[in-house]
Amino acid sequence: MQCVARTWIHWPLACLLPILSVGCTPDAPSDATNPVPKILASIDVPPASSLWTRNRGEDWPRMLGPRYDSHSTETGVPTDWGPDGLRVVWTHPTGTGYGNGVAAAGRWFQFDRYGNVERLTCFKAETGEKLWQWEAAVEYRDAYGYNDGPRCSPVVEGDRVYVYGVAGRLSCIAVVDGTELWSRDMNQEYHVVPNFFGVGAGPLIQGDLLIAMVGGSPASGSGRSPTVNDMPRARPDGTAIVAFDKRTGQEKYRVGNYLASYSAPMIATLDGVPHCVALVREGLLVFRADDGSGEAFFPWRAATIESVNAATPVVIGNRIFISEAYEIGCALLEFTDGKLNPLWKDSGGRSQQVMRTHWATPVQNGNFLFASSGRNPPDTDMRCIEILADGKTKVRWNQRNRDRGTSMVVDSHLLWLGENGKLQLMPLDPDAYRVTASMDLQSMMDPIDGQPLINSPSWAPPVLAHGLLYLRGADRIVCLELIAE
């Protein structure tokens, strides 16, 4: 089948850069199967003027928000949602995938799989009107029977949006119309042995760099592509994290002799300097974000081969909190004089551990952390823990809800979304679990097709931009008005 529409751009070098625009069928991607990196000279890209008409609020251009902490600066959240809950602004079906989209410049960017392509679709953030789409071929099948779509959310900065596919394709795309600017296949170029659930750690922007978790291995010389069955024997080759020129895709530095995890790296100021903080497969890796120097490492991973690190570290001053759900629980470290010094770590069995986050990153309010603790629903609860002055931690309360969830902090409240579609607003109370307002999105029907607004699993963290709340379930995006204009 052929594309019914093909759009060309008209600035320098534009004639070299056709894109797949709205109307392309899933079986008609461009040269996405070509493993050769498409590294281009830096070109001018038209600025993406804002499409917002809602004046209040801020953009949410990457997973966990503009400051990597799931905190929103917006105010005016109502505490009475009424019998019908928050107003549904728009909904749209999604393809296959786990990651939520992001909101920037009045646009919503959703990255999913359709058939044998991964597709980035750009919508008007306020209405859900489709503006353009970009596609690239993908070959990936989840060995454990989970879905085969991308796990990573897009990242937007200025006039460019970046996506990291489930099979390792890292691409830079123009915000204004979806033109592909450069693309590289991380798995092929860096000989990545496929992790158990594909590529799952989203990239980030720092200055002129795009920083991505890669976790490559030495070339095997066997002539065959590695599979997930090779994971138990995989060995690193110094490419845990690779930094690229964000405009051209050219490699700038590599750091860390470790494999990749599912925990998205983040940027934090430590000792007055921006550092990249990354929970790789083998533990916590910290280094200077500008050049990759000053590497520090703390081992942290359960012994079982199937264990994964998935929650992003939480940075509080010069302290770093890490957690996993398989065997060893959580730890608190202090970054001092370029070294990671453990202050405290969990001990004992699972029932004695203070925090066991699986894929949901804790949110912080002062000395308190709120999170979903537990690996699977039967052993999951929602809990608040306190970090004491001496670095020790203790549980303040837990609610045995058996519903793993993600959350964000907004207007002195915790906004919580359970994996089964239950949305709750709670005060940031370290003394007790209390719910101010709630709505069950799995029991509410979409007026367009009569299907539930949220089907399980809903594992992607919520997004709030300019008063609009974006939630992703198994098969659709739901935009709710959390804060009235």
Image (tube, rainbow, N blue to C red):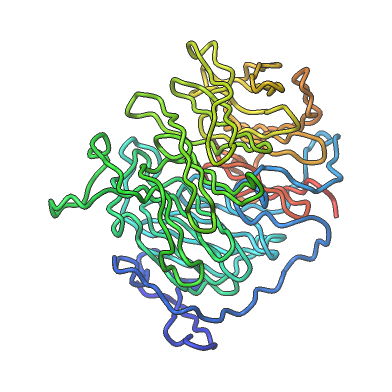
Residue 286 in view, yes or no = yes
Q: Is residue 297 left or right of residue 62?
A: left
- Please provide percent x and percent y for residue 200: 44, 45
- Disc tally is 0
Residue found at x 39% / y 29%:
307
- Please provide percent x and percent y for residue 149: 42, 49
Residue found at x 57% / y 37%:
313
- Vertical arrangement, residue 318 with respect to residue 28, above or below: above
- Vertical arrangement, residue 11 with respect to residue 254, above or below: below
Residue placed furthest toward the left: 222
Give residue 123's quadrant in the image.
bottom right
- Quarter the C terminus occupies: bottom right
Considering depth in this image, is 366 or 116 the residue closer to the camera? 366
Residue found at x 53% / y 37%:
339
Residue 420 in view, yes or no = no
Considering depth in this image, is 263 or 113 the residue closer to the camera? 263
Q: Is residue 236 left or right of residue 211?
A: left
Q: In this view, does 74 lie to the left or right of 249?
A: right
- Quarter the N terminus occupies: bottom left
- Please provide percent x and percent y for residue 102: 61, 55
Residue found at x 44% / y 23%:
326
- Vertical arrangement, residue 129 with respect to residue 371, above or below: below
Give residue 26's quadrant in the image.
bottom left
- Please provide percent x and percent y for residue 120: 50, 61
